Image (cartoon, grey):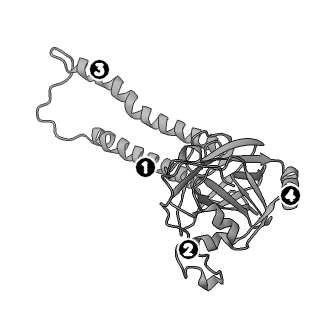
């Protein structure tokens, strides 16, 4: 899989770049370690009592040694800094991975994830469906406490915070089901808060969208309000449509007036973020 962000189980072209950089860094470290293990025994042998090394009590300066002592560390710092800079650019979760990305808006809840597809007009609960080979831009926020979104085999970890938006770009180059989860503790249902990322061919994805529009139920403000109480979702839920601008409305509910200049009306304020976190997990209806 190809992706951006922090990594746990790398594969694909970005992972190849990672391994290449790791090899460069390892080679640079060997430049320091190998000479030390080679030169140290030579110096100890040459300058031992009775050795052949010259005794120069008035020696003060040598250009060769100065260049070696200072030049090698400076060169290593520059090389390591360059490798780190390049790797940081490569792993930037905000870096777009191609033109015309599929935009998915994610709202982290207790103990579930709501996925909104603005382009397709559908939504899901605990199911992230993606087309193979198409760049994806994931926009994240939270409808409750801070949470951490990660798909170990596909995308790195990034936080979702109430009233704020973070972003993650990824690209799946292999079909299959991959597990995503929240890694930020948020109550008793934390251990079960996971979702399925289903990567399918582009044609299959279009078919899935059509099926969801035909079979799912609509998600409006009242339906979203029912998702706010902490609950565990046993099976993914499909929504044939959702209220336009729901993602921005969720953010605006924590910061009234933030989106007024964009024409988005804020949703009613949600319950206090920590209410219900000590309740026993129950199945969502």
Cα separation between marks 2 and 4:
30 Å
Q: Earlier in the sequence, mark 2 or mark 1?
A: 1
- Residue 104 picture location, percent across and down: 70, 61
The residue at which mark 2 appears reads as 269
Cα separation between marks 4 and 1:
58 Å
Q: Which mark is residue 215?
A: 4
Residue 140 visible:
no
- Residue 235 picture location, percent across and down: 72, 47
Q: Secondary structure at mark 3?
A: helix
Q: Quadrant of the N terminus?
A: top right
Cα separation between marks 1 and 3:
29 Å
Give the class, few, some or many, for how many residues have Cα within 10 Å of label 4's Cα (few <14, many ≥20).
Answer: few
Circles 4 and 1, Cβ within 8 Å, touching? The answer is no
Q: Which mark is residue 130?
A: none
Q: Earlier in the sequence, mark 1 or mark 3?
A: 3
Circles 2 and 1, Cβ within 8 Å, touching? The answer is no
- Name which quarter of the figure residue 192 lies in: top right
Q: Residue at x 81, y 47 (%)?
A: 200
Q: Nearer the viewer, mark 4 or mark 3?
A: 4
Q: Nearer the viewer, residue 25 or 209?
A: 209
**Side (left or right) of 124 relative to 261:** right
**Side (left or right) of 164 relative to 29:** right
The residue at which mark 3 appears reads as 41
Cα separation between marks 4 and 3:
76 Å
Rendered position, 141 above or below 264: above
Cα separation between marks 2 and 1:
51 Å
Give the class, few, some or many, for how many residues have Cα within 10 Å of label 1's Cα (few <14, many ≥20).
Answer: few
Q: Residue furthest top?
A: 50
Q: Nearer the viewer, mark 4 or mark 1?
A: 4
Q: Nearer the viewer, mark 2 or mark 1?
A: 2
Q: Quadrant of the C terminus?
A: bottom right
The residue at which mark 1 appears reads as 78
């Amino acid at each position: 899989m190809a992706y951006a962000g922090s990594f746990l189980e790398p594969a694909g072209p970005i992972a190849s770049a990672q391994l290449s950089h790791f090899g460069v860094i390892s080679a640079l470290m060997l430049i320091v370690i190998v000479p030390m293990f080679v030169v140290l025994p030579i110096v100890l042998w040459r300058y031992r009592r009775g050795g052949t090394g010259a005794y120069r009590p008035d020696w003060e300066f040598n250009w060769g040694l100065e260049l070696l002592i200072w030049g090698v560390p400076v060169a290593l710092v520059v090389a390591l800094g360059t490798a780190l800079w390049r790797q940081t650019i490569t792993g930037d979760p905000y870096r777009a991975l191609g033109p015309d990305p599929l935009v998915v808006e994610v709202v982290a809840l207790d103990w579930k994830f709501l996925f909104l597809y603005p382009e397709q007009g559908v939504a899901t609960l605990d199911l992230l469906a993606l087309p193979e080979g198409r760049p994806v831009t994931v926009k994240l926020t939270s409808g409750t406490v801070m949470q951490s979104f990660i798909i170990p085999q596909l995308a790195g970890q990034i936080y979702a915070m109430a009233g704020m938006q973070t972003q993650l770009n990824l690209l799946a180059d292999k079909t299959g089901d991959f597990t995503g989860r929240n890694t930020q503790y948020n109550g008793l249902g934390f251990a079960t808060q996971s979702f399925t990322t289903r990567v399918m061919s582009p044609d299959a994805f279009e078919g899935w969208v059509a099926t969801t529009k035909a079979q799912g139920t609509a998600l409006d403000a009242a339906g979203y309000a029912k998702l706010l109480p902490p609950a565990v979702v046993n099976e993914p839920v499909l929504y044939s449509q959702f209220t336009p601008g729901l993602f921005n409305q969720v953010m605006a509910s924590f910061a009234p007036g933030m989106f007024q200049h964009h024409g988005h009306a804020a949703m009613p304020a949600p319950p206090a973020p920590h209410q219900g976190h000590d309740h026993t997990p129950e199945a969502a209806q």
